[in-house]
């Protein structure tokens, strides 16, 4: 039997409701799979290569051990704006055919992140973070009219909001460790049309809209994390951060809304076949564990180089099952069979007094096999270019960054098997603008 | 060049093919076969469906722009009908059933000065492809009547006396698809009577007939791609009507007369016996069941058994609506034999076989999925079969064309483009303007429609059909008479 994870923390719930309201639609999946790594404007400007960097509240996300050397109460509040600048599918035979050109909705989405660092003793610090490490928002244009993938997915949303509490301890002046717990609130929303053959003319028509939805605050799962940072010399810091897997079992409800076909007899049959009300629906997502390995090197004259390799255990995402416990025969099972993936990141910062400018680059491998690439989630390898700047004093600061994502074209063409037999070439580029302010007491 | 290639033999031809640009893999394609090649849908052959025949789709993929078919005009309904009816889904009260929506008219392409490229002859079995040299538009079997349309081998025609193979050779094709053999067994299913030599061609005869076709068309420089025989016990005609009647708390079998393998001793007040598990009840039974035939008296029926197929010497078939398990097994065994013969003989000429049988078995079990659209072999609602329950729909024919293409690409190392399904999936397949669509009234899969189908699927060849009477024959021990024709 599926287990349901719930927490009841009144204050936390209120805060999360506010955060959830801010997540107007969802974060796009702008790192491999449906991972979101864009947290903190300084890190974003440096190619997200931040596991080997310390001294910033955003280290709660990248490497909690990095806050061990901080000796002020500090907070960071960030905002992230994401959009697709290009997202399309050029169709191919057998379906949807070479004449099909589908586009992804390119609205701006927004999600916040925030971090607090509280020094307890000289060696012991506490770090709290609220961030979205995973997320997906993919809505296609013309979902109910011309979109040929409307029977696979019109809109897929995964929201995940992590609350992460960390304790860090400096074992030695050069070495710190961290451990924490993470509760991930999450929701899933999937929408698609249901097709049927009109027996009077043999044509396929949409007969119903199906929406599966779960509540963000009602579903979640626990995880944990550990990290360390080692500074063998003043100019070099080496970091490693591991975040555990988190399994989330979702309980939600389905809504079947009939779409009239114009044929009364067919509509009557469809109406009789649609379940009334909002039947329950269950699903699960096996969120992966991840390991970030990074090094920061101060090159002198306010130059800082950061390098990082990230591993994500995407092989945990083996299938997606959608269960309708009260509707026999409607269950959906999709094999996913993703593979573990690596991303390689590099960032460079040059300081000018309190000002700093940054650039970065990373290459992210997709974990998604060809057969699984579909309108539900078309992932691809990507080259990512970042730039940013900031102004920071000991007590406060602000940073801004831009992240440009260039997805590689991904052609899924016969005879390559594809789960939905839906073929074509996907193109996508994305842009993230992020800003944050830091305050220290 | 062709002469040189022929003199050098098949190896040179293969080399020439390998060197040829993809668009010029084949210069001329011809299709041989039966109604499945002709493009019959809903029990009729009309232009609307011929343009979606599997050879037409394949020819398009091969970029053969001058692919000629014996197109037939489609007419609106008249009273009485002047041509064979085209069946479609119609309303019967508040339910959906099958009825005529248009009818066949005259030929549209009869003046073509050369043979057609699509030489599929509805009703033809394998032997007909070499023996049917004289068509007659007004009489004879279905194959003979359609031969007059497809081969134009009638008196006064330049094609008089020619069979399908001869006309194919006249065109000098370098690619022939041969999908024949279904009518060698289909009559057993549509007549509810598996009787070797009458409704089913014995495998040894089938082997000789198939060899006769191949020896006339397999020449150096020509590629032969054959489709094998699908399982005719797994089509909507045989799978739609359940063999059990649902009652509160369970179900009971329909009543049948029994046969030699399943003798019947009725218990009053019923005059028939419950059919054994594994019995298939064919579509025409729906009209009889609606009259209470096949339904036990205790459930409000007449207690009369559904008719099983009979053969009355010297040459009369009384069709039935039941296939008892021994008949199903016999049909499947014959199909397996046919397909082994096809595989062996096609391999002998260096051709490729499209395993239509396996493909449709898979579709029957798992459906066919495209872009979240789930198609199946379900009658009327599945999308893959047409309203006669026997022939594919336009979507089904595109699936078949795709199967030919994928097999050719894999087996022959070609790169023929995959057909585009988007048009056929979303375009309504209805009679053109002027052809009436009939709705309302009490329509079922009527006995008259059944007879049309029987004649079209070949049961009328060499013997007459005597439709079962409204009061079905009472069974005796051992069931109806079954006499193998001499």
Image (cartoon, coloured by chain):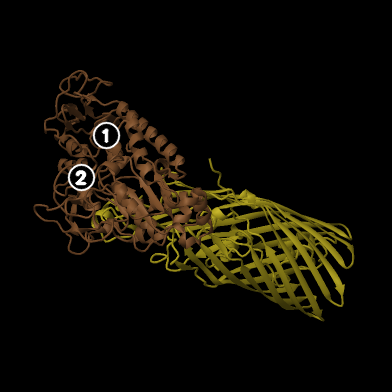
Left or right? Give the position of B134 relative to B231. Answer: left
Residue B156 rendering spot, x and y as whole percentages: 17, 54
Camera sees residue B89: no
* Residue A236, quarter of picture: bottom right
Image height check: is B168 above or below A154?
Answer: above
Q: Which chain is yellow?
A: A
Residue B436 rendering spot, x and y as whole percentages: 16, 59
Q: Which chain is brown?
A: B
Closest to the observer: B420 or B51?
A: B51
Q: Answer yes or no: are tags 2 and 1 on the same subunit.
A: yes
Left or right? Give the position of A33 relative to B175. Answer: right
- Residue identifier under label 2: B144
Q: Secondary structure at mark 2?
A: helix
Which mark is drawn over residue B188? Answer: 1
Camera sees residue B83: yes
* Residue A366, quarter of picture: bottom right
Closest to the observer: B66 or B324?
A: B66
Chain letter of the residue beneath label 1 in the structure image: B
Residue A369 rendering spot, x and y as whole percentages: 59, 54
Residue A67 rendering spot, x and y as whole percentages: 78, 63
Closest to the observer: A87 or B24?
A: B24
């Amino acid at each position: 039997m599926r287990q349901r994870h719930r927490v009841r923390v009144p204050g936390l719930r209120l805060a999360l409701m506010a955060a959830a309201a801010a997540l107007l639609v969802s974060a796009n999946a702008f790192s491999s799979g449906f991972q979101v790594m864009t947290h903190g404007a300084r890190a974003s400007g440096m190619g997200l290569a931040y596991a080997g960097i310390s001294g910033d509240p955003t280290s709660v996300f990248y490497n909690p051990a990095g806050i061990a050397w901080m000796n002020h109460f500090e907070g960071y509040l960030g905002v992230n704006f994401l959009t697709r600048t290009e997202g399309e599918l050029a169709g191919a035979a057998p379906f949807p055919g070479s004449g099909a050109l589908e586009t992804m909705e390119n609205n701006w989405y927004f999600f916040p992140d925030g971090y607090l660092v509280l020094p307890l003793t000289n060696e012991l610090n506490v770090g709290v973070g609220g961030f979205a490490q995973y997320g997906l928002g993919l809505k296609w244009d013309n979902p109910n009219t011309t979109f040929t993938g409307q029977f696979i997915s019109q809109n897929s949303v995964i929201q995940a909001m992590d609350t992460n509490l960390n304790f860090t301890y400096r074992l030695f002046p050069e070495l710190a460790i961290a451990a924490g717990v993470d509760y991930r609130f999450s929701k899933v929303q999937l929408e698609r049309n249901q097709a049927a053959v009109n027996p009077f003319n043999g044509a396929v028509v949409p007969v119903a809209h199906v929406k599966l939805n779960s509540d963000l605050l009602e579903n979640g799962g626990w995880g944990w994390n550990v990290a360390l940072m080692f500074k063998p010399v003043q100019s070099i810091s080496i970091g490693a951060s591991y975040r555990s897997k988190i399994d989330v079992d979702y309980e939600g409800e389905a809504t079947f809304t009939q779409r009239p076909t114009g044929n009364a007899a067919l509509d009557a049959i469809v109406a009789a076949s649609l379940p009334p009300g909002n039947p329950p629906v269950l699903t699960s997502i096996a969120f992966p564990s991840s390991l970030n390995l990074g090094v920061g090197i101060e090159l002198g004259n306010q130059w800082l180089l950061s390098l990082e390799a990230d591993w994500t255990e995407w092989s945990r995402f083996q299938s997606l099952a959608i269960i309708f416990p009260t509707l026999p025969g409607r269950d959906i099972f999709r094999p996913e069979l993703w593979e573990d993936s690596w991303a390689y990141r590099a960032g460079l910062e040059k300081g000018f007094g309190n000002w700093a400018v940054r650039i970065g680059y990373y290459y992210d491998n997709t974990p998604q096999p060809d057969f699984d690439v579909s309108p539900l989630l078309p992932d691809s390898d990507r080259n990512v270019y970042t730039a940013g700047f900031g102004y920071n004093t000991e007590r406060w600061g602000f940073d801004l960054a831009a992240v440009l994502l260039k997805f590689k074209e991904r052609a899924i063409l016969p005879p390559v098997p594809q789960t939905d037999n839906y073929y074509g070439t996907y193109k996508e580029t994305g842009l993230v603008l992020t800003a944050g302010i830091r305050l220290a007491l | 060049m062709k002469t040189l290639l022929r003199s050098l033999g098949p190896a040179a031809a293969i080399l020439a093919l390998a060197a040829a640009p993809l668009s010029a893999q084949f210069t001329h394609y011809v299709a041989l076969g039966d109604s499945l090649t002709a493009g019959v849908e809903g029990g009729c052959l009309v232009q609307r469906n011929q343009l979606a025949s599997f050879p037409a789709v394949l020819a398009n993929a091969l970029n053969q722009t001058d692919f000629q078919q014996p197109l037939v005009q489609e007419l609106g309904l008249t009273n009485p009908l002047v041509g064979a009816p085209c069946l479609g889904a119609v309303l019967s009260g508040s339910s959906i059933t099958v009825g005529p929506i248009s009818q066949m008219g005259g030929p549209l392409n009869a003046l073509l000065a050369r043979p057609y490229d699509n030489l599929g002859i509805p009703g033809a079995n394998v032997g007909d492809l070499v023996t049917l040299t004289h068509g007659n538009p007004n009489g004879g079997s279905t194959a003979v009547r359609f031969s007059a349309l497809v081969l134009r081998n009638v008196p006064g025609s330049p094609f008089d006396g020619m069979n399908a193979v001869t006309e194919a050779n006249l065109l000098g094709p370098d690619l022939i698809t041969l999908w024949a053999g279904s009518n060698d067994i289909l009559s057993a299913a549509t007549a509810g009577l598996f009787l070797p030599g009458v409704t089913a061609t014995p495998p040894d005869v089938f082997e000789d007939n198939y060899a006769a076709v191949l020896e006339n068309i397999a020449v150096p420089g020509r590629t032969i791609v054959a489709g094998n025989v699908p399982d005719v016990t797994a089509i909507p005609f045989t799978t739609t009507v359940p063999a059990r009647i649902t009652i509160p708390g369970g179900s009971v079998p329909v009543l049948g007369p029994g046969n030699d393998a399943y003798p019947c001793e009725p218990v009053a007040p019923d005059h028939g016996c419950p059919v054994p598990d594994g019995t298939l009840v064919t579509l025409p039974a729906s009209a009889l069941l609606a009259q209470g035939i096949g339904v036990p008296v205790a459930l409000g029926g007449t207690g009369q058994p559904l008719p099983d197929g009979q053969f009355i010497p010297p040459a009369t078939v009384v069709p039935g609506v039941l296939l008892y398990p021994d008949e199903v097994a016999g049909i499947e065994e014959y199909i397996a034999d046919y397909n082994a013969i096809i595989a062996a003989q096609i391999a002998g000429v260096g051709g490729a076989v499209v395993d239509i049988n396996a493909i449709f078995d898979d579709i029957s079990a798992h459906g066919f999925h495209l872009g979240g659209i789930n198609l199946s072999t379900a009658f009327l609602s599945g999308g893959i079969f047409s309203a006669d329950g026997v022939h594919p729909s336009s979507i089904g024919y595109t699936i078949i064309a795709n199967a030919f293409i994928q097999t050719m690409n894999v087996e022959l190392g070609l790169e023929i483009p995959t057909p585009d399904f988007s048009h056929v999936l979303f375009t309504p397949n209805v009679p053109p303007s002027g052809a009436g669509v009939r709705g309302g009234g009490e329509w079922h899969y009527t006995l008259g429609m059944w007879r049309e189908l029987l004649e079209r699927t070949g049961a009328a060849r060499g013997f007459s059909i005597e439709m079962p009477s409204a009061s079905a024959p009472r069974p005796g021990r051992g069931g109806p008479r079954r006499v193998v024709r001499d």
